[in-house]
Image (cartoon, rainbow, N blue to C red):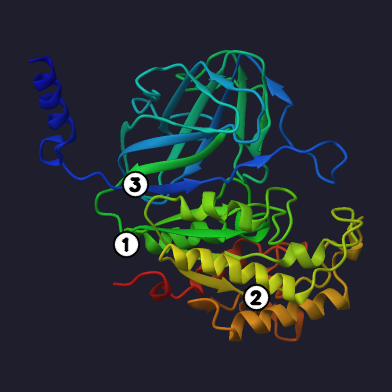
Amino acid sequence: MKLALLALVASLIFDPAIAGEKQAWVGTWLASPQSTWGADFALPVKIPPKLGNQTIRQTARISLGGQRFRVVLSNEYASTPVQIGEAHVAVAGDGSKIVSGTDRVMTFGGREKAIIPSGASLTSDPVDLPVDALSHLSVSVYLPQETPLSTFHWDGKQTAYIGAGNQTTSEAFATTQTTDARILLTEILVDAPANDGAIVAIGDSITDGNGASLDTDNRWPDFLAERLVPKQMAVVNAGISGARLLDDAMGVKASARFSRDVLAQPGVKAVILLIGINDISWPGTPFAPEKSLPSFESLISGYLQLAAQAHAHNLSIVGGTLTPFEGALSGTPLDAYYTPEKEALRQKVNSWIRTSGAFDAVVDFDLLLRDPSHPTRLLPEFDSGDHLHPGDNGNRAMADAIDLNMLVKN
């Protein structure tokens, strides 16, 4: 009798006709996790070494909307677990505020308190919160105990707020410090039954949005997301500033994170790859003082491996040519960022990207962004000012240059 009752309950739980409409989870926002680094590196981490009895409130603009969401927190690079005292999600208001009446508690396995194991992530239960595409969500996480911060995303381009005590439900947040990095928050998933999949943009600081204005959602994947809303396709940004194709640095090398950031994304249909300029430009600078210029063959092997992984998982992969960088960071301790030898390698790599047939399609970002009168430099109207990263206008041009037929099959 007891076994029969259990079987009946199981059938009720797992019968799709009884459970209701089809679930269709897809990534709608992403900030690829990175490990923090020491004070000996050329750039500061921009986050406190630890937090305790404090709340972090972070804003994320999603690509696709829906009726309910899951939030993913990452503790991937920590050696100790992280205790979550309470976590909430709401529609974001101005600054650190949330919109009244939209606050929802997040649970994990039905519980409001949770632990993120070391080296792992934590996915919330579904949260009922209907929002449209391109909406801003606010995620508030309370850390009750002293918590070393080892996993973050360095170049968030969005102000995050830190305050004393448990402020997860506060509509007006009492801020004690801010950062533009991401802390623990790594992904938002949406249940969108009408979705047509997700596009992953994987790359370095140009994809991460280093040259974009703060708090404006002006990265090129943001502009691409706007174009794809009518197609019911999500865009997730797997850019990491400082990322390289062949070596670990500010984040692990592309081949090591491709499974996590691309292949594991629910509903992924295609990937846009723009990476390699740091492999070429970093050697001989304070970023990689002992590193020699990579060989052309090693770079090509790296690209071919990513294309092979994508194709083995039935994904389309679009290759982006490496953008001009003459004059980049000149007059700084990184003055050797550009050299004629590095430029020659960039040109050789770009020629291969255009003609090899390794990718299903190519976006010629180099041709788009370069100054016709000085092709090794960015066109001034697209330059953020550092001669390396496109600014807001350049990012919009990059998104507009992508033929949606490369990504959308219907």
Instruction: Tell me what residue is drawn at x 40 percent, y 42 percent.
Output: 189
Marks 3 and 2, Cα distance to the nearest angstrom? 32 Å
Q: Which residue is mark 2?
A: 369
First in sequence, mark 3 or 2: give its number: 3
Along the viewing direction, whichever of 170 and 355 lies nearer the viewer? 355
Circle 2 packing at 10 Å, graded few (<14), some (14-19), many (20+), is many
Residue at left 13%, top 26%? 7
Can you see residue 388? yes
Q: Position of residue 48 (x, y in %)?
A: 73, 27
Residue 404: x %, y % from top left: 41, 72
Q: CA distance from mark 3 to mark 1?
A: 12 Å
Q: If the image is split into quadrants, where does the C terminus sit?
A: bottom left
**Above-or-below relation of 231 to 18:** below
Tag 3–tag 2 contact (CB < 8 Å):
no
Q: Residue at label 3?
A: 65
Q: 136 or 336, which is in the foreground?
A: 336
Q: Earlier in the sequence, mark 2 or mark 1?
A: 1
CA gap between label 2 and label 1 equals 27 Å
- Residue 230's tag is 1
Q: Residues within 10 Å of mark 3 (few under 14, many from 20)?
A: many
Look at label 1 and name its amino acid. Pro
- Residue 213, how many percent across, how many down? 63, 52
